Every structure is written in structure tokens, then in C-alpha cells.
Amino acid sequence: MVRLPLYVVIFLLSSISLLLLGATDDRLTPGEFISLNETLVSDGGGFVFGFFSPANSTGDFYAGVWYNNIPQRTVIWVANREKPINDSSATLRISDDSNLVIMDSEGGIFWSTNLSGFGKPRNDTAAVLLNSGNLVLRANSDNMLWQSFDHPTDTFIPGMKIQYYYGNHSTRYITSWKDANDPSPGNFSLGIDSSTPIQLLIWSGTKLYWRSQVWFGKMFTGSRAINTTAVAYLTVLADDDEINLTVSVSDASLYVRYTLNYLGQLELLIWDDSSKNWRKYSSVPNDKCETYGWCGQFAYCDSTESVPTCKCMEGFEPKVQSDWETGNFSAGCIRKKPLRCGDGDGDGFLRVEGMKLPDHLVFLRNRNIRDCRTACLTNCSCTAYAYPDVTSGNATISPCLVWVGELTDTEMLSSGGEVLYLHLMDINLGMHFISFPLDIIIS
């Protein structure tokens, strides 16, 4: 029998102990840790959680989640984006107070889930990477304490929610990276605004940069992915407590993500396995013309043109013609002829199809289309109305929308869009004139 020297035995026991402390599989439990060269892999193999260093980095490390089966490392979530760590001995572990933390070699905390109220340490706490890409901290296997999907960074994937809470008027945002290789918070953020009927907004700092179409109740928009028959859906669901925006895909094997890039564009990206690249299916805004209010008041961005172009609405002309000739549209347009007002006699509406409806609408309840038109026609300050058919759950509703004062941030779309009825003096209307009280057939 060969006797090993005592120092060899001690070394082997220490090595085995360190291996036991290292995290395994898809979860991390108290006493275990992840070092810079270790990862968790979700049960199912879809995602990885670990430390990474961006391209061109000078030694900064971040903890994050990325796709496991994609050759290009594509990070969907970053823990310590505001405070990178440059200590090669850093670890991620569950602390004595049951928080998930990133610690340096001296015990300093660079990031934490910041949960409180647990008192003494819990031995049943575990951090688990789910195959949805969601990193969760839970107790007793089913008691969710914290999840990364509640703290998104720049990417929105199936299973995540962008939310607005009515109770405290708080919005869950996604925020762009600072640049292509810097995960720290950038200048652009995306969230839901409920000050009007629901809209999705992108801000540049505190300034509104882009605005979606108006949404009512529950809405689906489908996008057919390239080379497949799968469809990606955005779903808006609102109740008395909150508004939820989710993304889903009919083929769960596809990798689909919405990412707010550092230039302020919201991109729909689909992984193309044949070319081994992310294929951009759509993005907004695509041109300055599509950014918020670029064309000024009473003007619209015509996105049906090969190059999106600002145009005055029918019956309006540039307020400062010389500015328009140099590409400065900020002053917008003014009426060629004022409304006659009074009881509305002689004024009417121009039907304009395929429009993104203007901002700052007023929602009039319990109005049919005739009442809606009358409300606008008899108010000299009313500049337009709309009466779109929209889906809310299993029902179709037709809200009365009116605009008082300036029409801002309007766009003519190449597909989709709503009908906008523009309030004009009849001399400007020609064959498109819709006078009161003409009957309207509702299809």
C-alpha cells in the first residue's frame, strides 16, 4: 500500500472542496460561487449565465446572460452594467442575507439583488437560470424572490414584460447600451406611456424621440420571419392595475429578440441559422423624418416614399418656405384658408387614409361616428377626428378620438394605419369633401 505524503493529501482535499463549492448545471446554492471562467447553463441548454468582457474592453468584466447555441455571443441581460468589475478574482454568490451578489477578492460588493427582510440566512435559497433566459432567485423551489426579467437592460425577448403600473405611475424600461461594446446605460430608453390611450415611446435622455401608433385594450401585430412560416407577436394587455407589453413567437425553436440599440432604434432581430447571423426584420425609427415631431405641426412624414419626406397636410402650406427648402421642417405648416366656424356650416372633413394618428388626442366616450364628427365640426378648435375599429379582447370597439389645436407627429404609413378626418374649409376639399350631415357607411 502506497502512503501519500501529508501535504499531498491536504492538497487533494482542498481541490475537491473547491470543486464542490463551484456552481454546477443551471443553479447556484449557498456556499457555491461562480468565478470569471465558470458559467451556469439553463436546463435545456438555451442560455448561459456568467462573466464576460466586451470587445475592446480594458479588463472590465460584467455578469450577464447570453444565448448558448449561437456562435456570436449575444448578451440579453447584464447585472452590473453600471459598475463593471476589473478584479480577476471576483465571484458571484449568494450572500449571508440571501442576496445574489458580485464580490471582489476583498469582499466588496459590486452588485446585489438588494432584497431585504430575510433576517437570518436561508439555506433553501437558490439562483437558477431558466431556459427562457430568466435568472431567478427563489426559496423552497417555488417561492420567487427576484428575477432578471423584472430588471431588463436593452433587450426584450419572449417571457419578458414591459409594464406600466397605474398605482404608483411607474414604468419598466429597457435602456440601450452606451455603444456597441459598452453595456453601461446609454442615452435611449423605451417604455409605455399611459397619459393617453396606450403608446410605446422611445426617449433620448428626457426628450421624446419616437412614438408608436395608439393602442387600445389588447392588440396583436404579427411579423413573418424570414425563410419560415413563424410569426412574432407583440401583445398589449391592459386592466385596471397595469399595462403589459409582451413578445411571443409561434415557433418556440426560433431565437427572436427586440433590442433598443445605442443609436435609438428598436430592432426586431431573428437568428438565421443558415447564414449564422442575426437578420434584422424591422426597425423604428428608420429615418429622421420618422422621429418625434420632425416635420413640425400640421405636417406629416410620408413613409410611402422611397426616401421618407415631410409634407404639409392638404389645405396647409409651409409656415416658413425658405426653411423647408433647406430641409428645416421644425416650424411646420399653417392653414391656407381659416375655418368658417360658427355652426360648422361650409366646413367639412378630408378623409386621409393610412395614417399614424397625431399625438395629444382626446378620447370622447360613448359617441357613435355621427356624434364624434359633430363634436369636432361644431368646435372651431377641433382640427381632426378619427373613429378607428380596434380589438379589445374578443370585442371590437370604435373610440371617438378628436384633436384640439396643433396636429403633431403624424406619419403616412406604407401599410396599416388609420383613417384621419382633417377639419378644413370646404374650398380646400374638392372631391374628398365630407360635409355634415352626410351618412357614413361603417364597414
Image (tube, grey):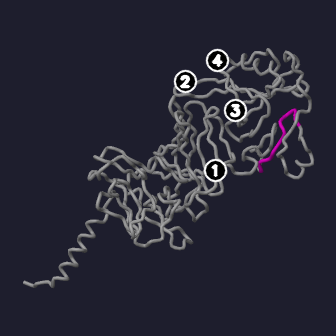
| Residue interval drawn in magenta | 307-316
Question: Which numbered mark, 4 or 2, is in the foreground of this view?
Answer: 4
Label 3 or label 2, whichever comes before in sequence order: 2
Above or below 337: residue 81 = below
How far apart in space, not on screen, are marks 3 and 1 (Cα)? Answer: 20 Å
Indicate yes or no whether the magenta region holds residue 1: no
- Near-viewer residue (305 or 349): 349
SS state under label 3? strand
Is residue 72 in view? no
Marked residue nearer the N-terminal end (3 or 1) = 1
User: Marks 4 and 1, Cα distance to the nearest angstrom?
Assistant: 36 Å
269 to the left or right of 299: left
Local SS, label 1 = strand
- Nearer-N-terminus badge (4/1): 1
Check disc 4 and report its element: helix, strand or loop. loop
Residue drawn at x 45%, y 71% is: 87
Residue 422: image quadrant is: top right
Report the disc number at residue 395: 2
Task: Tell me if mark 4 has few (under 14), some (14-19) or many (20+) residues whose alpha carbon lies within 10 angstroms of its own.
Answer: few
- Which numbered marker is on residue 366? 4
Residue position marked by numbered label 3 in the rendering: 418
Other-residue count near label 3 (Cα within 10 Å), few / some / many at <14 / 14–19 / ≥20: many
Q: Which of marks 4 and 2 is nearer the N terminus?
A: 4
Instruction: Provide the residue designation for mark 1.
Output: 283
Q: Which amino acid does label 3 sit on?
A: Glu
